[in-house]
Amino acid sequence: MPELPEVETMRRGIAAIAGSTIAAAVRLPCRRRPILIRPRPAMLARRLVGRTVAEVGRLGKRVVLRLDSGDHLVFEPRMTGLVLVADPPSVEHLRFRLDLAGGPIPSIWYWDRRGLGSVRLISDRQLAEQLGNGKLGPDALELSANELRARFANSRRAIKVALLDQRAVAGIGNLYASEILHLACVHPAKRCDLLSDRQWHAIHCCMLKVLNEAIRHEGSTLSDGTYRNALNQSGGYQSLHRVYDRAGQMCRQCQSTPIVRIVQAQRATFYCPLCQRKRSKGKSAST
Ligand SMILES: [Zn+2]
């Protein structure tokens, strides 16, 4: 968290700054663990002030402002970061502010409770090196079913673990991986190379469905309350979670089996043992 739907919601929340000019870039005094800001504040301000925001984009789980200088300002929220236009959840965790002129939004803030996120200004070349092909896969919303399959079909990894690999497909994290596989009726520990055509098709279709629906509901705000949209409001998708953080509760699909929690690659996975059966070798894998 935040994953593609939450970061896309942040992006949409500040999209109106496209066309605005940057009047100031300020690292805010914060007594908490400092976030990574690059380059250092004086150099950062020099390269930002007077520049126009050409485009408000997203790369995987990052909000990226493309500037008329060709530079890119990358906000990476990691665990607890937020990009806001108003009303921060707390003042003491505000880290960075961009003042803007000539548009409807006077300032945007970067807020981060745990401080694991970053704000970095990088050139076109650095963007290609750090977040280009080979480093970051195609966006989960822009990948075809065939491309998805081609990226994973020879892998012996469990599908749930593979979906978290940002070099293969960008944007899916721990929460939505469980949600997608439940909707697709695929067992999270099923090896990629053993999935059928039909299962790949289901995973692709459910990936788009879950992510787009979560964007429509402005993401998921979990019980810790950290994630907020750009106006400091909760997301709404958490009430629609099928399996995530529902261990022991009844599956909403079959209405007969409690959701189970397992650990895969040190991360919690939630699934329904009835709806997501792992067929034994030799039987049909077209669940
Ligand atoms: Zn079920």
Image (cartoon, rainbow, N blue to C red):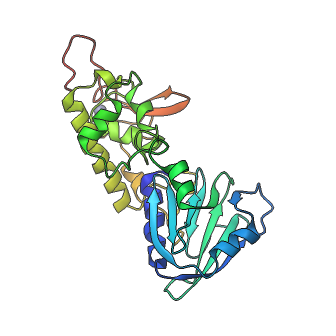
Total number of numbered labels?
0
Residue 90 placement (x, y as % from top left)? 67, 67
Residue 48 in the image: above or below residue 95: below
Residue 184 in the image: above or below residue 215: above
For the residue pair 95 and 166, the one nearer the viewer reads as 166
Taking the spot 45% from the left edge, 38% from the top edge, the residue there is 164
Which residue appears farthest toward the right when viewing the image? 31
Which residue appears farthest toward the top when viewing the image? 282
Residue 148 in the image: above or below residue 100: above
Residue 278 placement (x, y as % from top left)? 31, 20
Which residue appears farthest toward the bottom when viewing the image? 102
| Quarter containing the C terminus | top left
The answer to whether one can see residue 116 in this image is yes
The answer to whether one can see residue 230 in this image is no
Taking the spot 28% from the left edge, 40% from the top edge, the residue there is 147
Residue 207 in the image: above or below residue 35: above
Left or right: residue 142 compared with residue 6: left
Find residue 180 and report its image quarter: top left
For the residue pair 139 and 272, the one nearer the viewer reads as 139
Residue 267 placement (x, y as % from top left)? 53, 33
Quarter of the rendered structure image containing ligand 1: top left
Residue 236 placement (x, y as % from top left)? 41, 59
For the residue pair 124 and 53, the one nearer the viewer reads as 124
Left or right: residue 230 compared with residue 47: left
Taking the spot 37% from the left edge, 59% from the top edge, the residue there is 215
Taking the spot 41% from the left edge, 37% from the top edge, the residue there is 163
Left or right: residue 270 compared with residue 91: left
Find residue 282 and report its image quarter: top left
